[in-house]
Image (spheres, grey):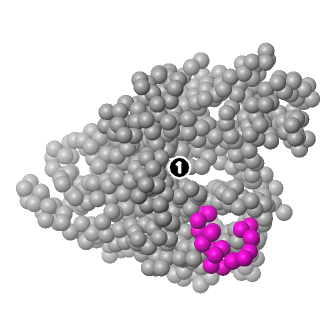
Amino acid sequence: MTLFSFATPENAAVENIRLQAAERAIADFLRSQVPELYDAFLLAIPTGREGILQRLWLSILRENIMNLGRSAVSLRRCGESWKPDPAHAQPDRQRVHEVFALFRPLAHHFAHVNRVLVLGFPKQRCDVIVPIQQSYAFGRFQVAGPYHVMHPNGTFHPLEHPMDVLTLLENESINDEQAPHFRMFAEDVCNSAANLSLAHAYRSMLQAHYSTFRPDTNLFVLAAALRDRFYARTEQWVIEGHPCHPGAKMRKGFSAQETFRYASEFQREIPLSFILVHRRLASVAARDAHFDWNAEMFKHEPHLSETASFLLEQRGKNRDDFILLPVHPWQLEHIVPRLYLAEIQSGDLIPVPDCDSPYYAGMSLRTLMPAKEPANKPHFKLSLQVDLTGEVRTLSEQTIHNGPLMSRILQTIAREDAAFPAERFILMQEVAGAHFLHPQDQGSKQTERSENLACVIRENVYRYVNEDEIPMVASALLAKPYWLNKPVIVELLERYRGAYHAGKSVQDSAKSFFCEYAALAVDGFIRLLVKYGIGLEGHLQNCIPVFNTDGKPVKLLVRDWEGIRVYRQRLQNAGFDPTSFHPKSRILVDDLDSARNKMFYSVVQNHLGELIVILVQWTGIVEEELWEVVRNAVKNVFDLLEQDPAVRQEAREDRAFFFQEHADYKSIMWMRMIGEAHQYMYAKVPNPLAE
């Protein structure tokens, strides 16, 4: 069956292109509102689709969805001919023979790769040819279209849109119970593909402008020129989103116009909104007992103090009875009037007009960073009832409560644990949070209303960055900004090589650079897990490496405690009170492997693993050499921890987990397909750290 219809645009810049609904919505918006981007968007559609197709096939193979990965036939090119791959665990001989016979007449279409995987869809009596450019650790593949469906009669046709793949999956194995979740997932993937095309179109426009006006810029010139405005730019460079998630660019809830207005890659200033909330309807949590919410707000937004006083006097209200709460402008426009109408009418909630507080969106969209005074003001993590990468990004009561609590715990560890590398591994503080809480709300109504009007105050990145240092979100290391024809990490590596490894090979320099980076990363993460049971979520988006002007990594900043896991027993053994956590806490667990998996997956598989892929692709270094670097860095930390009698046993147990033969890979796509987004599911993949 076909889940979604396609249409051909008028005056298309690409011949014979058919637009899916999400693509058509963006095209219509651009044609009427941003016509200079319309043709660029149409030209970028194949790129956006291919980006999501790559993630789909990667997830299908890595998670072994519907057993398609393990049952695949692998064929490898040897010179001018193709043969069954002797290194692959093939299915039965008859199946390999049948597939090879069908493939041979089509082999000339796949000269761009040396290997293909042929995935069988027996219910539909067809196979899909997936070209493989390269394979990496943890079962990660680099696939390269085009992808073709092959039929028993020898005919074949291309799969050009992610929906083509999803239709095959649905017809093959999705049951009636799973169907609603699957179709929602399919809609999400289409949304993701359309938004990725838009991001690439905007990048191509910037690239054309840059090549005309700024041909000599490099990373270090830009950092020096922008100074404390530089960090926000690094989040804006990341247009691809999650490197493996098919919903990487999902913005469900935003219109095309709102995506263009609020998504970080479009570099638009966002006017931060504020609302006055009566204190009896607000729950405030703070890291420090003496914290004064309004004093913090008005310190950074002094022009709003007079406005707030005027609004409250107008209504006969006492200023001391209200707090000033930041709110995302989209949320204020679309959600606040619907959910809090009675409180607005009673004067218990008072939107503040004309705030004149420009901010930039970060990669997550709901975290806003100051556009003015970018080094001084805090960052705000805000409720946003938009589905991004498969989750609605509101803020739960437990997030508001636990963020400052975890910050206090982590601050204590950094201050009192003499062995903790606090100068190099910096835990960014969530100093306070607040959310709406009506005393008469109960059950689902309380949950909905408390989560949709909430804010976390997070420290500014530049609090921890010296004048001669360059911070950037780790995701940006993989990005190719519009002014650069290579990933940012390669630019850093070239500078590092010139400063520290002149005359040495690029591979030797890459290994040395990565050795310094990996040592920074694994030390703090492992110590927190072993000694305190804290499994931080150290993926690329949550980490901010800091480099000196020679490209050398010198610090790692880590942020965001919402998705972490904390093993209750270890935390308690370390002297912290686990009963202080919110009673609905998801982060506090009694399953140690949950905390281990959280840290191992995010830090080793995602963060370090994706950097390794880029370094292998761009320097030619052997992948195993870089995993040996990680292995040694991890060993060094465990060796030190095992010298401490207080945690020797924990260190030995965690070491065994890190070096086991297979690791758990979070089955992101399968979880979304069947509607289990909050129930973590894992597939087993080979562990490159195994001894």
Counting every numbered tag in the picture gives 1
Magenta residues (range):
489-508
Query: Where does the image place residue 389, in percent across and percent down from the top left?
Result: 51, 44
Question: At 24% from the left edge and 66% from the top edge, which residue is drawn?
Answer: 301
Residue 125 vertical placement versus 191 (above, below): above
Outermost residue toward the front in this view = 212
Q: Assign the C terminus to one quadrant of the image.
A: bottom right
Q: In the image, is residue 286 part of the stretch drawn in magenta?
A: no
Query: Where does the image place residue 339, in percent across and percent down from the top left?
Result: 28, 41
Residue 551 vertical placement versus 61 (above, below): below
Question: At 74% from the left edge and 18% from the top edge, which residue is drawn?
Answer: 155
Question: At 60% from the left edge and 22% from the top edge, which residue is drawn?
Answer: 176
Task: Name the residue tied to disc 1.
Answer: 241
On the picture, is 500 further left or further right than 324? Answer: right
Outermost residue toward the top in this view = 153
Q: Quadrant of residue 385?
A: top left
Foreground pick, 645 / 407: 407
Query: Where does the image place residue 369, in percent across and percent down from the top left?
Result: 37, 61
